[in-house]
Amino acid sequence: MTTIREVCVKINFSYFINNKKSKEMEKDGLELEITELRLGLPGRDVTEKMMKKRGFTEMIMASSGSNSEQCENGLVSSGVDVEKVNDSPAAKTQVVGWPPVCSYRRKNSCKEMLSTKVGLGYVKVSMDGVPYLRKMDLGSSQGYDDLAFALDKLFGFHGIGVALKDGDNCEYVTIYEDKDGDWMLAGDVPWGMFTESCKRLRIMKRSDATGFGLQPRGVDE
Amino acid sequence: MNYFPDEVIEHIFDFIASHKDRNSISLVSKSWHKIERCSRKKVFIGNCYAINPERLIERFPSLRSLTLKGKPHFADFNLVPHEWGGFVHPWIDALAKARVGLEELRLKRMVVSDESLELLSRSFASFKSLVLVSCEGFTTDGLASIAANCRHLRELDLQENEIEDHRGQWLNCFPETSTALTSLNFSCLKGETNLAALERLVARSPNLESLKVNRAVPLDALTRLMSCAPQLVDLGVGSYENEPDQESFVKLMDAIKKCTELRSLSGFSEVAPLCLTAFYPICENLTSLNLSYAAEIQGNHLVRFIQFCKRLQRLWILDSIGDKGLEVVASTCKELQELRVFPSDLHDEEDNDTAVTEIGLVAISAGCPKLHSILYFCKQMTNAALITVAKNCPNFIRFRLCILEPNKPDHTTSQSLDEGFGAIVQACKGLRRLSVSGLLTDKVFLYIGMYAEQLEMLSIAFAGDTDKGMLYVLNGCKKMRKLEIRDSPFGNAALLADVDKYRTMRSLWMSSCEVTLGGCKRLARNAPWLNVEIINENENNDLMERNEEDEREKVDRLYLYRTVVGARKDAPPCVTIL
């Protein structure tokens, strides 16, 4: 499945429609709106200012899946800020100041806090059946063995470490979400690569893991 | 005309506290005007650019308490450039020079500098209370001057400010002789706190009723603080992400048990559920609970706690509580007056099944007869639900509904939400503040203009079809004071229809609408008593240098307000005052 990101990378420029009253038309009193096709790079010129009431609906539809078709046709609805589509396939275009939550609250809502911490090696760790999330510093572990030990300690449960080492023999699997938003089985890639790309960890029951959509294991298999 | 000597009249006036009433009194006669203004101690200025400090001081020489508001409301949502204005320094400067006996200063959305705070701390010997809400521009150095120099300081309340934390020793700057503190709130500080200094300060402040600490105060410190301040009424806790061990937990619970006066709890950012549990002993006494920063506490834990809070009057919570959780609130909190439900998932990162819907709102309206203020972020709404809510709760004073997706219709009928909001304004005769959202046509504004007789503040986003919508509101709502509109198709016709209307209003905000530069210029010409500000963040800012053809250019952001002192001199380049 191509992600929105990949589709947009293929396109070097985008057409966008700019509704503008023609000055000549107005002088004749016709007040007709003509559409003006312009070539331009996505991003800067396409500001939320171009969004009229209906424009927002177009934008939301465009960014949630039908985007790829529209991109390929070369037509992007006014108001879509293609530049803002980031690595996460779930990201929607953000309207400035919407929803109307004050900036202090945005900055201090827990999720914001945690996402800024990722760069420092802290990741969220959740375990199925446990009602709260933990955070741990990947940087404080030296390898998968260390990680196994740390996870065991975090949740007070001794099965996790076994899962990492033994692979197929225990109740739980440890998976992680990487920078691309894909969920991968922990333990496959070299440790350094793992710490760089791991955004969060999840300890999942093996029975739930099948059909979860894990990315296939590496070439070594 | 006066049958009583002035002193008697003044004494009678002392009983009248409300600003509106005092303003009315001053209009009765010349002598009443004089008596009133000379005896007035508290002044509220809703827009710091409507008047200047010199005129304020001239009129009210006995001023003791001043409240000032700066930036427009939409500045909260990053719609106003950083450098727009709202500087408090000229005010403090003028008050200092005139030797006003200032005791209280309350600021909202203003720019405050360390120099201002230093000047404040040195200029008013009786200064008692500083409350800063959503302000910025200062650091902990400024706080240090307040702490050090305001010998009679009782209240230092910092709410949601952007403060640069120099990790200095500002708490140490309170002299040992300072024992008068009743309220200390530094929850918005990001840096480390000198715990020893804090504990000493709390220990020597027997009158301390309100204490709100920041993230950096760990659990054991909180326990010690509560132990030496069992008289606390209002507590804001810090951040406790790790579950406490058995011993710490027991100590915390013991300390909490002793706080029998505790009525209000807040803070709780990044809190492990067990820490919340520690407050079980006193939760039956709570009248106010703010868990709106506790994103990590799952809904069921929240609900378990709230189940015991039978006396709650005010609840701020995240939508992770879910409709089911709100049903529990409805059946438990019969004294509830104010509810705010904030969105927990601002970037729509996860499939959010636990966000709230119309079901939760209806449940609350049915279960809480005293409810009068609501702020509700939800993912969907129906007309039927709003009509039911209106029937259940005709006493709303503030009704703010934010459906997260703009233009979203009634999800069962696909119609606009005009009828639902219409029902609200028709039933709630005392409604003073309203925010609308979802798919809305001009009709909803017809209803608002027709029924919302007491409405003072209206917030509109992505709504309406034509200028008629805005006109219904301007013509109908006689008590309108603040109107703020974004991304709606209202233009010059509505803006210019009744220029005198703006004499009766504090301000009007319009962004991403259809008003043009020409329209704004015409308005400014016809209303010299208005400041018509155009805010543009584009590269070519020189609106005045453009030729006449650009009159048709749509205005990005328009902010207009009545003023008696003309155009302000401190506007940045991105702001043009017509």
Image (tube, rainbow, N blue to C red):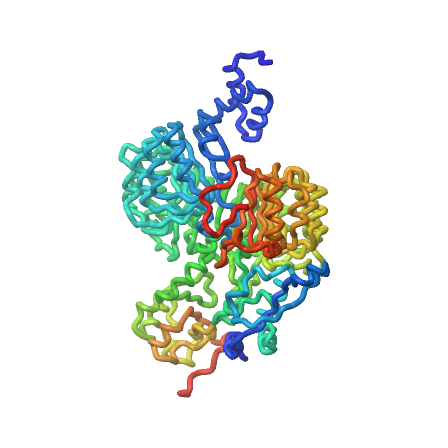
Give the image location of residue A145, x and y in percent. Answer: 32, 75
Q: Where the C terminus of chain A falls, by quadrant?
A: bottom left
Give the image location of residue B572, x and y in percent. Answer: 45, 49
Give the image location of residue B266, x and y in percent. Answer: 45, 46
Q: Is residue B342 above or below residue A61?
A: above
Between B234 and B259, which is closer to the camera in this rendering? Answer: B234
Q: Residue at x 31, y 44 (%)?
A: B141
Give the image location of residue B574, x and y in percent. Answer: 48, 52
Work out whether residue B323 can be spotted: no
In the visual, does A103 lie left or right of A33? Answer: left
Q: Is residue B155 above or below residue B241?
A: above
Q: Is residue B474 above or below residue A208?
A: above
Q: Is residue B550 above or below residue B559?
A: below
Q: Residue at x 39, y 68 (%)?
A: A157
Between A153 and B362, which is closer to the camera in this rendering? Answer: B362
Work out whether residue A151 can be spotted: yes
Which quarter of the figure has residue B112? top left
